[in-house]
């Protein structure tokens, strides 16, 4: 083709969380709302369903494997349930994730003339760096025997750089989407439509094999779609983690995160004061996946926060939510701050932590290239975009509609680590042994003196494969 359109879009890659706390109109005793219930054990499922039927309370969603449920009812009904049913571990008003939309950067699009561009040579500075100028491909490109499960916004199944590696898709967005606000969502289990473009971009970092290349261009992909065009219930995401583990994927990539509130309270029957049900269910789902032999990789987020600074994180959360939450509340990033998660921060072309990347001692496990904005801060927007200087910092990725886009974020760093783990597991036959694969990867990272920023160091795929 004579002209290749490269859309330049800035993805805000960490979802913004909408929290519901006491005092909000939706928590009115007489108004129907949705609540997340986490049981002491999945063994109580039959009794729980029977109780809901007897009380005429609607069961909206269930993840039976870990005893997680979403119900629709009134606050008073939920309070009575929690007080009377002794096998309810925790409950709260359901948390929904609102993914940030794509934001055009100036100029809105750049057209490259003069024939098909060589994406690898011209734009994939990050991938050349990660693969030691392509030398890792000479060792292995992976195989369909090793699979990465991508929990995200779907995938463009017709993208020429991805379609040969897509093994399956599964949709978790129910009919009508979140609270019936998405009439175009039909609840089709096979729907892969990527309205946001995020899932397609992430997939390209892992396994693109065409005009652009991913870390592991022969690796298999299973797509688990949890975002439609708007928001996602947390229970859908937890369900997707469980399903990916049941499907025996080798790596589960979660390129987003949620800030959830863990409130210190004496009376567990007090409603809506924290997100304990979601926190415990996320932790259980990750543990379930780990026991099934799946490594879970997550991005650390793009707020530029030290996640070990509890006060700073809490104040950031409170400033964005404008809620009067007491000081004994603790805000944590899920799933990045959970056990058995490989947490990935972002560096830029300079090798320094990206200005937007979160960080924290004993939070970051490893870092990978996710782009940066340092040059933008130096030269200003006019030169940065007008002269195409953004290409020195931005990351190229696949986009729906057989196109390519530039973006930045820790969500781009995480799938590079997922792809690297896929190569290791495939090469060294470490299926169902995620800890061994992770250990090799971390041991061979390029050491960085500042572990707060990069943990074990910066991803070095070549060294890990030749270990």
Image (tube, rainbow, N blue to C red):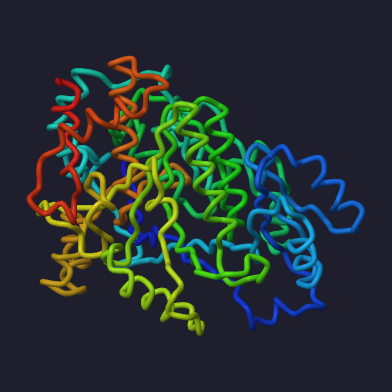
Q: Quadrant of residue 355?
A: bottom left
Direction from residue 149 to residue 173 in the image, left or right: right
The extreme left residue here reads: 449
Question: Seen in the image, is 320 located left or right of residue 465?
Answer: right
Q: Residue at x 49, y 34 (%)?
A: 289
Report the label total.
Answer: 0
Which percent across, then down, holds residue 180?
73, 61
**Quadrant in which the C terminus is drawn:** top left
Quarter the N terminus occupies: top left
The front one of 47 and 275 is: 47
Task: Name the spot of residue 380 as percent of width and height, x first.
Answer: 16, 74
At horizontal 43% and vertical 27% (from top left) the residue drawn is: 250
Residue drawn at x 75%, y 80% is 28
Q: Nearer the viewer, residue 124 or 42?
A: 42
Please identify the quarter of the rendering in which residue 146 is found. top left
Residue 112 can be seen in this image: no
Q: Could you say where residue 40 lies in the image, as x and y percent from the top left?
A: 65, 47
Question: Along the horizontal axis of the image, is 151 left or right of 277?
Answer: left
Q: Is residue 192 above or below residue 78?
A: above
User: Can residue 208 be seen at all in this image of the molecule?
Assistant: yes
Q: Position of residue 78 (x, y in %)?
A: 76, 65
């Amino acid at each position: 083709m004579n002209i290749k359109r490269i859309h330049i879009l800035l993805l805000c890659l960490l979802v913004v969380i909408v929290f519901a706390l006491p005092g909000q109109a939706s928590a009115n005793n007489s108004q129907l709302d949705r609540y997340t219930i986490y049981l002491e054990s999945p063994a109580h499922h039959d009794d729980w369903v029977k109780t809901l039927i007897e009380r005429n309370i609607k069961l909206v969603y269930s993840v039976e494997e870990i005893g997680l449920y979403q119900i629709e009812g009134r606050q008073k009904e939920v309070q009575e349930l929690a007080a009377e049913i002794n096998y309810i571990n925790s409950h709260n008003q359901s948390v929904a994730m609102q993914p940030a939309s794509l934001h055009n950067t100036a100029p809105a699009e750049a057209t490259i003339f003069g024939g098909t561009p060589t994406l690898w040579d011209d734009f994939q500075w990050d991938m050349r760096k990660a693969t030691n100028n392509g030398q890792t491909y000479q060792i292995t490109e992976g195989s369909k025997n090793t699979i990465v499960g991508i929990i995200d916004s779907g995938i463009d199944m017709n993208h020429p750089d991805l379609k040969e590696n897509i093994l399956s898709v599964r949709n978790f967005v129910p009919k009508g989407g979140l609270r019936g606000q998405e009439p175009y969502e039909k609840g089709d289990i096979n729907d892969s439509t990527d309205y946001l473009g995020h899932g397609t971009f992430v997939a390209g970092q892992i396994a693109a094999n065409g005009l652009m290349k991913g870390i592991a261009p022969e690796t298999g992909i299973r797509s688990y779609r949890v975002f439609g065009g708007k928001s996602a219930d947390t229970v859908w995401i937890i369900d997707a983690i469980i399903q990916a583990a049941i499907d025996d994927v080798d790596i589960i990539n979660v390129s987003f995160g949620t800030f959830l509130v863990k409130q210190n309270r004496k009376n567990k029957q007090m409603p809506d004061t924290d997100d304990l049900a979601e926190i415990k269910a996320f932790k259980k789902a990750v543990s379930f996946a780990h026991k099934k032999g799946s490594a879970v990789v997550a991005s650390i987020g793009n707020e530029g926060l030290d996640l070990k600074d509890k006060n700073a994180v809490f104040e950031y959360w409170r400033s964005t939510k404008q809620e009067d939450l007491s000081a004994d509340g603790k805000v944590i990033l899920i799933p990045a701050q959970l056990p058995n998660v490989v947490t990935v921060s972002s560096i830029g072309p300079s090798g320094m932590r990206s200005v937007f990347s979160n960080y924290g001692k004993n939070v970051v496990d490893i870092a990978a290239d996710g782009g940066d904005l340092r040059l933008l801060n130096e030269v200003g927007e006019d030169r940065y975009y007008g002269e195409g200087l953004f290409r020195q910092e931005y990351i190229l990725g696949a986009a729906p509609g057989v196109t390519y886009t530039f973006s930045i974020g820790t969500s781009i760093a995480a799938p590079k680590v997922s792809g690297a783990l896929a190569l290791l597991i495939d090469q060294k036959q470490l299926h169902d042994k995620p800890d061994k694969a992770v250990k090799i990867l971390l041991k061979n990272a390029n050491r960085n003196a500042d572990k707060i920023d990069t943990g074990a160091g910066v991803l070095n795929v070549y060294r890990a494969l030749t270990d």
